[in-house]
């Protein structure tokens, strides 16, 4: 009588630093940094918590690695691109990464142990500006101004009480109904003539504001200030 073949044991995917960090990113995307614990990371990977310490030192090491993953997702400019176009593409990419990873906005500028992707990102931005003729001082001003705008816009966008243009109109209508319109004429004008118009999308303000910054930086660059 032929013997029954024994089942082939499942091959477990080896645990690596990359897998640990990716699992941490996924958990933080879903529940925020406060929900991130070594135990939960281990559970998501199907291992014991102690196994993680073969690949990461502690939670701070994980946070540093997560930030580096986020910076690595930002599209960097090509050396042949116009500096303004390169910064526009970067701004859109940074906004996308921060929106995809809401936890990142509080961490990406606060860590003191940057990884290679973080350093490469910063070096690339500075290099694009310097190669375009920015002085080192103006490059520093430009980097700071652009990031302050991008991060600030995303923070504001995340805190808004609406997610779609239709919700904007509903909220604006409710505010106008409960407020004496003649006491706030300019606010009423903004709401009626702009915000409540068909096709309005607050997200469209991002590009306009960023272009204002780039225009100012271009004037400073050409004037050598």
Image (cartoon, rainbow, N blue to C red):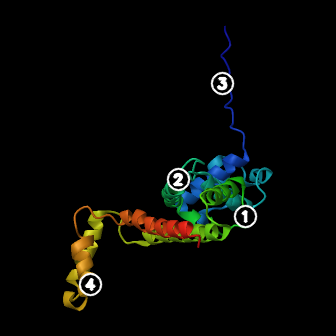
Q: CA gap, disc 1 to disc 2? A: 38 Å
Residue 60 tag number: 1
The crowd level at tag 1 (other Cα within 10 Å; few <14, some 14-19, many 20+) is few
Residue 204: name its quadrant. Answer: bottom left
Res. 40 visible in picture: no
Q: How many marks?
A: 4
Q: Position of residue 114 (x, y in %)?
A: 72, 61
The residue beneath circle 4 is: 186
Residue 7 tag number: 3
| Mark 1 vs mark 2: in front | 2
The earlier-in-sequence mark between 3 and 1 is 3
Nearer to the camera, 220 or 50: 220
| Mark 3 vs mark 4: in front | 4
Q: In the displayed orientation, state which residue is furthest to the front.
A: 223
Nearer to the camera, 90 or 52: 90
The earlier-in-sequence mark between 3 and 2 is 3
The residue beneath circle 2 is: 82
Residue 21 tag number: none
Q: Position of residue 25 (x, y in %)?
A: 60, 55
Q: Secondary structure at mark 3?
A: loop
């Amino acid at each position: 009588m032929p013997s029954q073949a024994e089942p082939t044991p499942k091959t477990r995917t080896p645990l690596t630093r990359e897998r640990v960090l990716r699992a941490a990113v996924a958990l933080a995307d879903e529940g925020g940094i406060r929900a991130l614990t070594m135990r939960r990371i281990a559970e998501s990977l199907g291992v014991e918590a102690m196994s993680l310490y073969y690949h990461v030192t502690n939670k701070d090491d994980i946070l540093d690695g997560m930030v580096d993953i986020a910076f690595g997702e930002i599209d960097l400019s090509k050396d042949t691109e116009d500096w303004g176009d390169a910064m526009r593409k970067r701004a859109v990419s940074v906004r996308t990464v921060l929106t995809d990873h809401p936890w990142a906005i509080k961490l990406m500028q606060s860590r003191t142990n940057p990884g290679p992707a973080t350093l490469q990102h910063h070096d690339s931005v500075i290099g694009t500006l310097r190669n375009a003729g920015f002085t080192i001082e103006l490059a520093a001003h430009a980097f700071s101004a652009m990031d302050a705008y991008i991060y600030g816009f995303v923070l504001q966008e995340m805190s808004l009480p609406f997610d779609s243009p239709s919700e904007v109109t509903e909220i604006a209508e409710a505010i106008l109904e409960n407020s004496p319109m003649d006491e706030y004429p300019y606010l009423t004008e903004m709401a009626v003539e702009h915000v409540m118009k068909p096709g309005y999308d607050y997200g469209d303000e991002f590009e306009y504001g960023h272009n204002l910054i780039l225009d100012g930086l271009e004037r400073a660059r050409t004037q050598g200030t």
